[in-house]
Image (cartoon, helix red, strand yellow):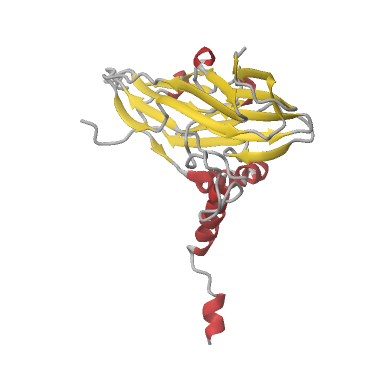
């Protein structure tokens, strides 16, 4: 008689499966909820979002910082730690009624530890459509250095 | 005093997919089920209208699709980044290349005069209100 119960699909079951998938996507990949995270990682949803990719000859870091002033971005590499800091101030219209204020406002900072062979002398950075792309060639070096955003 | 919220959001890709399915748009529905990112938005209202500002980094003008369907404002965009071949992801906060969100507009908003500006991955959409209490003359025919 239980078969009939097992066979019964609750109307919410589909939604639950979907939610489960969404959660997997949120917490999966980089680390599970109980998994190990990078010591400098920030909570999911932190501004600005960050992706890091590796190719044979370079490490490419993408910082999703829409509306940031590229001239005010401070990028530095010290002891293989890439730090990016900046600021995004969102003006508030005092006359207006706000329904949603989800966009980040204020100073931000993110740090990425680079592989041993990242070459701090050969770094290129550019800002396009709100994405800061930093390309660090692979080799050996650990000198601190400032990188100018073109 | 605002008693009725003028813009209501239909959250999530589920609603979006359902909408697309309703329109019988199979291809788009399939694309949307690939969990689209919901961009963070600021929405505020002044006497002149409603402004919506969305963070959509990586979206250029060519890859932005802003449209009004019936009374629904739909924002869609595709994220483009400088990809190199043989790239291996080491870490990724952003795991989708599709942004999508939609809002139901209220009748006093002038959907034909919506203006949008996209700069550095920030989209600003201005939706003006209709000229309010516009006197209407009703002609009585014999």
Front-lying residue, A105 or B132: A105
Q: Is residue B94 above or below residue B46?
A: below
- State the residue in front, B127 or A6: A6
Residue extending furthest toward the left:
B1
Q: Residue at x 61, y 39 (%)?
A: B92
Identify which residue is drawn at 69% across, 34% down.
Answer: A116
Q: How many marks?
A: 0
Q: Position of residue B44 (x, y in %)?
A: 34, 26
Tell me the quarter of the picture where residue A128 sits: top right
| Residue A80 in which image quadrant | top right
Residue at 31% x, 28% y is A98
Q: Residue furthest bottom?
A: A1
Question: Which percent across, then down, holds residue B11?
Answer: 46, 43
User: With respect to residue B102, does A122 lie above or below?
Assistant: above
Q: Can residue A70 be spotted in the picture?
A: yes
Q: Residue A23 in the image: x percent, y percent?
A: 52, 52
**Left or right: A10 as drawn, with respect to B105:** right
Q: Is residue A26 above or below residue A114?
A: below
**Split into 4 quadrants, where in the image is the C terminus of chain A?**
top right
Q: Quadrant of residue A60?
A: top right
Is residue B69 left or right of A133 when viewed as pictured? Answer: left
Residue B129: tell me if it is visible.
no
The residue closer to the viewer here, A74 or A51, is A74
Q: Nearer the viewer, residue B138 or B63?
A: B63
**Would residue B111 be found to the left or right of residue B94 on screen?**
left
x%, y% of residue B100? 54, 36
């Amino acid at each position: 008689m239980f078969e009939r119960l097992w066979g019964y699909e609750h109307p919410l079951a589909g939604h639950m499966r979907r939610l489960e998938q969404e959660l997997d996507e949120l917490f999966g990949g980089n680390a599970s909820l109980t998994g190990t995270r990078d010591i400098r990682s920030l909570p999911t949803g932190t501004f600005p979002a960050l992706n890091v990719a590796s190719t044979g000859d370079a490490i490419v870091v993408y910082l999703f910082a829409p509306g940031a002033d590229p001239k005010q971005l401070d990028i530095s590499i010290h002891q293989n730690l890439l730090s990016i800091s900046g600021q995004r101030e969102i003006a508030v219209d005092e006359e207006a009624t706000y329904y949603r204020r989800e966009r980040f406002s204020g100073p931000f900072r993110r740090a990425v530890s680079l592989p041993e062979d990242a070459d701090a002398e050969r770094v290129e950075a550019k800002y396009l459509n709100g994405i800061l792309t930093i390309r660090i060639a692979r080799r050996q070096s650990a000198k601190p250095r400032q990188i100018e955003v073109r | 005093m605002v008693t009725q919220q003028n813009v209501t959001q239909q959250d999530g890709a589920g609603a979006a997919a359902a909408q697309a399915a309703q329109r019988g748009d199979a291809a788009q529905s399939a694309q949307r089920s690939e969990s689209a990112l919901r961009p963070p938005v600021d929405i505020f209202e002044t006497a002149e209208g409603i402004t919506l500002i969305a963070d959509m980094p990586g979206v250029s003008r060519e890859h932005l699709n802003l449209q009004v369907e019936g009374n629904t404002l739909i924002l869609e965009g595709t994220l483009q980044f400088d990809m190199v071949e043989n790239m291996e992801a080491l870490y990724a906060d952003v795991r989708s290349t599709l942004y999508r969100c939609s809002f139901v507009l209220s009748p006093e908003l002038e959907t034909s005069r919506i203006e949008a500006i996209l700069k550095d991955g920030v989209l600003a959409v201005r939706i003006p209100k209709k000229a309010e209490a516009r006197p209407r003359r009703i002609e009585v025919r014999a």
